[in-house]
Image (tube, rainbow, N blue to C red):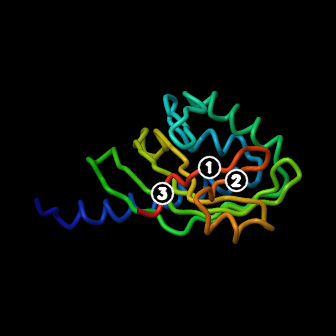
Amino acid sequence: MEMDLEARIKRLEDRAELNDLVVGYFLAADGDDLEGVGNSFTDTATFSSSGVLAGEGRGAIVDFIKASREQMGLTIHTPHYAQLAFEGPDKARGLVGAHLELVLGGTAVYGAVRYVDEYRRVGDEWRIHSRDMRTIHIAPWQQVGEAFESDTPVRWPGASGAASDYPRR
C-alpha cells in the first residue's frame, strides 16, 4: 500500500522522534537522570536483559536502573544504529545496536549490545514499551580481546563467562 506524501512525511518525523528517544534514554542513563529514564517508557513497559525480566512497569524499571547505577561509575552508552519497522501509526519495533563503556563494581568494562525494542505512541510522544538488552560481548578492558574471540564473550564482572546472545553460527 503506497502512502500519500503527508503520511510519508509523518513516517519520517516518527523515525526522527524514535531515534531521539533512543539517544535520550542513553543520555538520561549516563547522566543519572532517573526522571528522563522513566519518561522514556510507557506506564506498562517491560525491561529485560537477555530475556530475563528485570522490571515491569515504569516505576519498577526506574528502580532497576537506579539499583544498577548504584554499582556503576562513569558510563557511556553509544548507539550506532536503530533499525525501525512500523506496525501501524502508533506502534513500531526496533533493533538498536550500541557499545557500552562502564565502570561496574570498580571494574572498567567494554562491550556491544543490541536492544530489542517495541515502541508505542502515548499521546503525541513515542515511548519504549518493551526493551530487551541482548549482549554480544562484554568484558573487563584487559580481557576484551580474549573474550571476544572465545566461546564465552559475555564476561560481566563477578559472573562466569557466558555465550553471546548472538553467537556466530
- Gap in Å between the C-alphas at discs 3 and 1? 11 Å
Q: Horizontal and vertical percent for residue 108?
A: 82, 60
Q: Residue at x 69, y 51 (%)?
A: 28
Pointer 2: what residue?
A: 155
Q: Amino acid at mark 3?
A: Tyr
Q: Give the class, few, some or many, for how many residues have Cα within 10 Å of label 1's Cα (few <14, many ≥20).
A: some
Q: Amino acid at mark 1?
A: Ala
Q: Which quadrant is home to the N terminus?
A: bottom left
Q: Horizontal and vertical percent for residue 18?
A: 46, 56
- Gap in Å between the C-alphas at discs 2 and 3? 14 Å
Q: Is residue 76 left or right of residue 61?
A: right
Q: Amino acid at mark 2?
A: Arg
Q: Residue furthest right?
A: 106
- Please tell me which of labels 1 and 2 falls first in the chain: 2
- Please tell me which of labels 2 and 3 falls first in the chain: 2
Q: Horizontal and vertical percent for residue 151?
A: 58, 59
Specify the label residue 89 is tagged with. Answer: none
Q: Secondary structure at mark 2?
A: loop
Pointer 3: what residue?
A: 166
Pointer 1: what residue?
A: 162
Q: Secondary structure at mark 3?
A: loop
